[in-house]
Image (tube, rainbow, N blue to C red):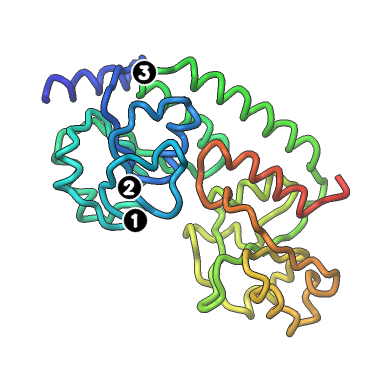
Amino acid sequence: MRSVWLAFLLLAVSGSAVAVERVVSLAPSLSEIVVELGSADLLVGVLDAGERPAELKHLPSVGRYGQLDMERLLSLKPDLLLLWPGSVGPAQREQLKHLNIPTYVAEPHNLEQLIAQIEAIANQLGRPERGTSLATDLRQRLDKLRQRYRRDQPLHVFYQVWDRPLYTVGGGQIISDALDVCGARNVFADLTLPAPQVSVEAVLQRNPEVILASDQAQLDAWKAWPQVAAVMNGELLLVTDKGLERPSGQMVEATAKLCQLIAPDR
């Protein structure tokens, strides 16, 4: 195992493809990326958190979000782990470090990082040409969205994650970058936490022109403050596409739908 680990490190540094045969994905978004790369045949186990792609329904589970079944994981004898840090608790992440299993850690904070990580994952899977092809397509689509929705004065947007307590996304969260692509600006982009808790008063003070949420009742609640620009202009918009919640290749298409929602006139 030590020789495999050393080889992995050398190949990772050089950027060369590494041939793997047994991959375990420890995040739904990473599982989706493997499927998008046409490499589902390499997966031998996945971490569960919601609906799986059809191609992965037959695979063994290695636990659920935040709770990894370490014994099941080891029984699958993976030669590569794909990890998003938030999907596994700190104690178990520390355990994984001592298993000497090659691990690729992905935590993109913007869409360009996401695309670069898709390419890197393809390299780790030993299928770099698939990563290059997918990344090229995603970058072209993203460039077109930026050109189409660019504004000299970005729209000020409040993206509501939850209402009790009130949560939003910070500037380092990938959804904040998706808003930028759409010619908008997250009114809480100055906050560094991925999902900061904010107050109603803070939202009122920043006076967003658009409020986005995935629940209609949460949007309707803002009508109690008619002085907010988003309420005055009827810009309380329902986000129905779940693709924004999982940073995989599908997030570019989800971003296109977000742009259309925010600026249908473009």
Quadrant in the rendering for residue 59 = top left
SS assignment at label 3: loop
Badges 2 and 1: C-beta atoms under 8 Å apart? yes
Q: Which sits earlier in the primary sequence, circle 3 or circle 1? A: 1
Q: Earlier in the sequence, mark 3 or mark 2?
A: 2
At which x and y percent is residue 99? 14, 38
Closer to viewer: mark 3 or mark 2: 2
Measured as percent of width and height from the top left, residue 52 is found at 43, 46
- Give how far across and how far down residue 60 sits, in percent: 28, 43
The residue where tag 2 is placed is 47
As drawn, is 248 to the left or to the right of 260?
A: left
Task: Give the position of the C terminus as an image quadrant.
Answer: top right
Q: Does residue 216 appear left or right of residue 56 in this picture?
A: right
Q: Is residue 182 above or below residue 219?
A: above
**Disc 3 residue type (three-letter):** Gly
User: What's the CA distance linking mark 3 and mark 2?
Assistant: 22 Å
- Which mark, residue 65? 1
Q: Nearer the viewer, residue 262 or 199?
A: 262
Q: Tell whether label 1 touches label 3 (CB within 8 Å).
A: no
* Farthest left residue in view: 2
Mark 3 lies on residue: 126
